[in-house]
Amino acid sequence: MVNSIVARYTDGRIIKGTSLDVAQDRPSCHVRTADGEMVEVELKDLKALFFVKSLEGNKAHIDGDTLDPADPRSRGAKLIEVKFHDGERVVGLAMRFPPNKPFFFLIPADNVSNNLRILVNREQVGSMSILDGA
């Protein structure tokens, strides 16, 4: 399946495009940019890899941090807050807490977010905590 992704590097660079080979247990993935260039992305160099609905996004939307108690996505998951070293804060659902791998998936709590899921680099996380609500 082709995924639209936004790769956010620890140095601030951003690469947007599509990928077919993202896996949390692989060291890299390949991204085809809008101009057709194929870029190899080393996951260790990223803050996070965002799987998105649209590469353009919606700058006017601010992701919420609450979860509807009836949201079926929360079954078996923990609602957590992730604070990155750069100050960004994301609230989402994790299937395992604390994560036991260098990279872990987070599903945004806001179900209308442009982000479908986020592959987080644990080395770039300043803190994580469980929130009430899931």
Image (cartoon, grey):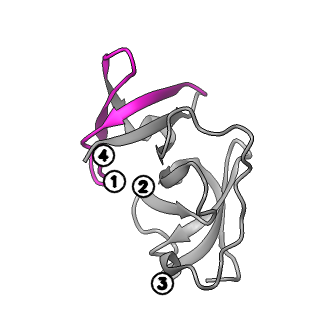
Stretch of the chain drawn in magenta: 12-38
* Residue type at tag 2: Phe
Assign a secondary structure to mark 3.
loop
Instruction: Tell me whether the residue at label 1 lies in contact with that at label 4, contact meaning CB atoms closer than 8 angstroms.
Output: yes
Classify the position of the C terminus by image quarter: bottom right
Q: Quadrant of residue 19?
A: top left
Residue 75, x across and y down, in percent: 48, 84
* Residue type at tag 3: Arg
Provide the residue designation for mark 4. Answer: 22
Q: CA distance from mark 3 to mark 4?
A: 24 Å
Residue 39 lies in magenta, yes or no? no
Provide the residue designation for mark 3. Answer: 75
* Residue type at tag 4: Val
Instruction: Tell me whether the residue at label 1 lies in contact with that at label 2, contact meaning CB atoms closer than 8 angstroms.
Output: yes
Q: CA distance from mark 1 to mark 3?
A: 22 Å
Q: Quadrant of residue 47?
A: top right
* Position of 36 relative to 65 (above/below): above
Q: Earlier in the sequence, mark 3 or mark 4?
A: 4
In this rendered view, identify the residue nearer to me: 100 or 64.
64
Q: CA distance from mark 3 to mark 2?
A: 21 Å
* Position of 33 relative to 97 (above/below): above
Residue 16 lies in magenta, yes or no? yes
Provide the residue designation for mark 1. Answer: 24
Query: In the image, is 82 to the left or to the right of 75?
Result: right
Assign a secondary structure to mark 2.
strand
Q: CA distance from mark 1 to mark 2?
A: 6 Å
* Residue type at tag 1: Gln
Q: CA distance from mark 2 to mark 4?
A: 12 Å
Q: Earlier in the sequence, mark 2 or mark 4?
A: 4
Provide the residue designation for mark 2. Answer: 103
Query: In the image, is 87 to the left or to the right of 120?
Result: right
